[in-house]
Image (cartoon, grey):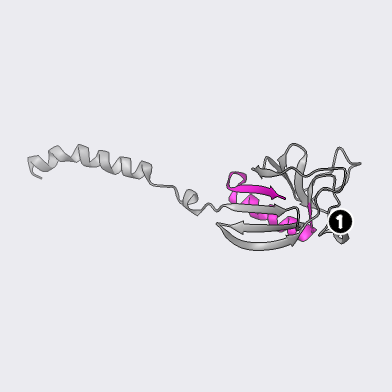
């Protein structure tokens, strides 16, 4: 090698090292964004992945005397099996907690889906709750949002 090439090698290695360090990791490029949009007036949930609607499901939200919080939230904790500490150990399968004690979860009261019936949580058919739980788990809680509008 010539002397001029040898003098440039350290700077070439530096440029390569910086390029490798700044290149996004494969898992970062593959991360999806999941949004579960709950429309209280329609009692429906619309699930989108990377901006494309994937599911539309009936839900039950807060009945008279209770409230479901409005806003956009990140999931805080998730449980495959959970039982309410406040409401007599009621089952809350595939729970995704997003604001204090509020969660999206499966219900056995499927006949009430499509109308307000809960103490404030967002209830889903058990199979839909399972799908949402798996979807959020696959992309990670940081890549999911729960959006609730009137």
User: Which percent across, then down, holds residue 46?
Assistant: 67, 58
Above or below, 8 against 105 in this view is above
User: Which percent across, then down, holds residue 123?
Assistant: 79, 52
- Tell me if 7 is positioned left or right of 129 in this view: left
> Which residue position holds label 1?
108
Query: In this view, which residue lies farthest toward the right?
Result: 88
Residue drawn where x is 53% and y is 51% of the image: 31
Depth check: give the residue in front, 67 or 60: 67
Instruction: Count numbered badges in the picture.
Output: 1
Circle 1: is it few (<14), some (14-19), or many (20+) Cα within 10 Å? some
Residue drawn where x is 82% and y is 47% of the image: 62
In the rendered view of the protein, which quadrant contains the N terminus?
Answer: top left
- Tell me if 127 is positioned left or right of 143 in this view: right
Is residue 137 a member of the stretch shown in magenta?
Answer: yes
Residue drawn where x is 42% and y is 47% of the image: 24
Above or below, 60 against 15 in this view is below
Q: Secondary structure at mark 1?
A: loop
User: Which percent across, then down, holds residue 38?
Assistant: 71, 53
Which range of residues does the magenta coloring cover?
A: 123-150
Query: Image quadrant of residue 17?
Result: top left
| Magenta stretch: dominant secondary structure | helix
Is residue 56 a member of the stretch shown in magenta?
Answer: no
Above or below, 50 against 141 in this view is below
User: Which percent across, then down, holds residue 100?
Assistant: 74, 36
Depth check: give the residue in front, 75 or 69: 69
Depth check: give the residue in front, 23 or 122: 122
Residue drawn where x is 73% and y is 56% of the image: 130
């Amino acid at each position: 090698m010539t002397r001029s090439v040898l003098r440039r090698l350290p700077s070439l290695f530096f440029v390569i090292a910086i390029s490798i360090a700044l290149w996004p990791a494969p898992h970062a490029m593959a991360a999806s964004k999941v949004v579960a949009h709950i429309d209280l007036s329609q009692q429906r949930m619309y699930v989108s992945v990377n901006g494309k609607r994937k599911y539309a499901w009936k839900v039950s939200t807060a009945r008279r005397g209770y409230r479901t919080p409005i806003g956009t939230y990140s999931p805080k904790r998730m449980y495959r099996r959970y039982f309410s500490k406040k409401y007599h150990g009621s089952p809350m399968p595939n729970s995704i907690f997003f604001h204090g004690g509020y969660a999206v979860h499966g219900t056995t009261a499927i006949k009430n889906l499509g109308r307000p019936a809960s103490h404030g949580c967002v209830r889903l058919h058990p199979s839909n709750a399972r799908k949402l739980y798996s979807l959020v788990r696959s992309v990670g809680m940081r890549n999911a949002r729960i959006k609730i509008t009137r």
